[in-house]
Image (cartoon, grey):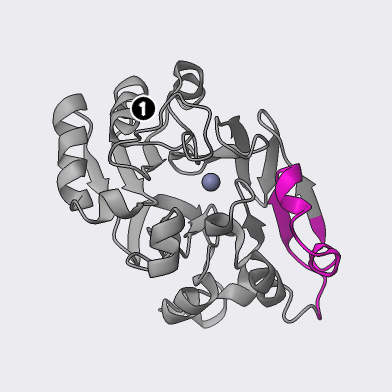
Amino acid sequence: MDIMDTICFVGTGGGRMATITQLRKTAGIFLELKGARIYLDPGPGAIVHARAEKIPLEKIDCVLLSHKHIDHTNDAQVLIEAMTKGVREKKGILAAPKSTISAITKYHQSAPKKILKIKPGDKFNIGDLNIEATKTIHTDKDGVGFKFFASKKISYVGDTVYSKDIAKEHKGADILILNCLYLVNENKGKDVEFAKHMDLADAIKFAHDIKPKLCILQHFGMGMILKKPWEKAKEVEEATGVKTVAARDGQVFDVGDGVKKGKTGLERFA
Ligand SMILES: [Zn+2]
């Protein structure tokens, strides 16, 4: 019996205004890759919408956080409680950069079996799934992106502006997930709090350099949400020749065969 590798965009919103208006959910991504169940960047609402999507939160292996901002971490603690069955069982992994781990209470840090403090370049694994952390250029200087070595190579670039070096780290990705927060980042290059976020022009550069088989845009701020992200995805595709889609809240992508499992018990007769 094959188990598919899947990516579920529980929510596709990001940034301050999408977070407080919830025009798109800020619930993060649930990945099932090579049998490992990972909840990535659970912003506000993750616990509610994950339940609505019937995601088996008691069975997750890892709460994975890319950086400390609220739209990526707000529900991390409650997910740690779900993963550890109400802090009754010491199980699972919390993996995050230094800045982000210190934003989690000591109580919740003590609940999982393992804490992984990650920085760019680190390689680690969740069960059979190998992961590599990549660098970002963001207001949380400890922030990271991730490469998941599943049946396909999946890159989550994280919150960052474009850079040639970062694009280089994600070369060879089959599926490229881009947090395209802005339509146009008017503060690009300026030394202000909101300058270090990806906009559509950055997304086009990343897709152009990395040339994945599929580019998925998500983590939309208001500017993107109000301008029909699916039409903006078409612009990326036209500019780069890379097949590009804008994820919808709750959308699941099957990315290939994850693990083969031998049939057991009565399944053998099915
Ligand atoms: Zn951020």
Image quadrant containing the N terminus:
bottom left
Q: Quadrant of residue 212?
A: top left
Q: Is residue 193 visible?
A: yes
Residue pictured at 58% horizontal, 37% vertical: 139
Can you give x and y, in whole percent of width and height, for residue 175 in the image? 37, 39
Numbered-mark total? 1
Q: Is residue 40 visible?
A: no
Residue pictured at 68% horizontal, 44% vertical: 125
Q: Is residue 140 left or right of residue 256?
A: right
Residues in magenta, as a range: 88-114
Q: Decide whether residue 93 is among the magenta residues.
A: yes
Can you give x and y, in whole percent of width and height, for residue 74 in the image? 60, 64
- Seen in the picture, residue 40 relative to 53 is either above or below; the reply is above
Residue pictured at 52% horizontal, 68% vertical: 44
> Alpha-carbon neighbours of circle 1 within 10 Å: few (<14), some, or many (≥20)?
many
- Seen in the picture, residue 31 relative to 237 is either above or below; the reply is below
Q: Is residue 104 left or right of residue 201?
A: right
Residue pictured at 38% horizontal, 69% vertical: 22
Is 171 or 184 nearer to us in this picture? Answer: 184
Q: Which residue is mark 1?
A: 206
| Amino acid type, callout 1 | Phe
Is 102 or 92 nearer to us in this picture? Answer: 102
- Seen in the picture, residue 54 relative to 5 is either above or below; the reply is below
Q: Secondary structure at mark 1?
A: helix
Image quadrant containing the C terminus:
bottom left
- Seen in the picture, residue 239 relative to 98 is either above or below; the reply is above
Can you give x and y, in whole percent of width and height, for residue 244 in the image? 23, 40
Q: Decide whether residue 238 is among the magenta residues.
A: no
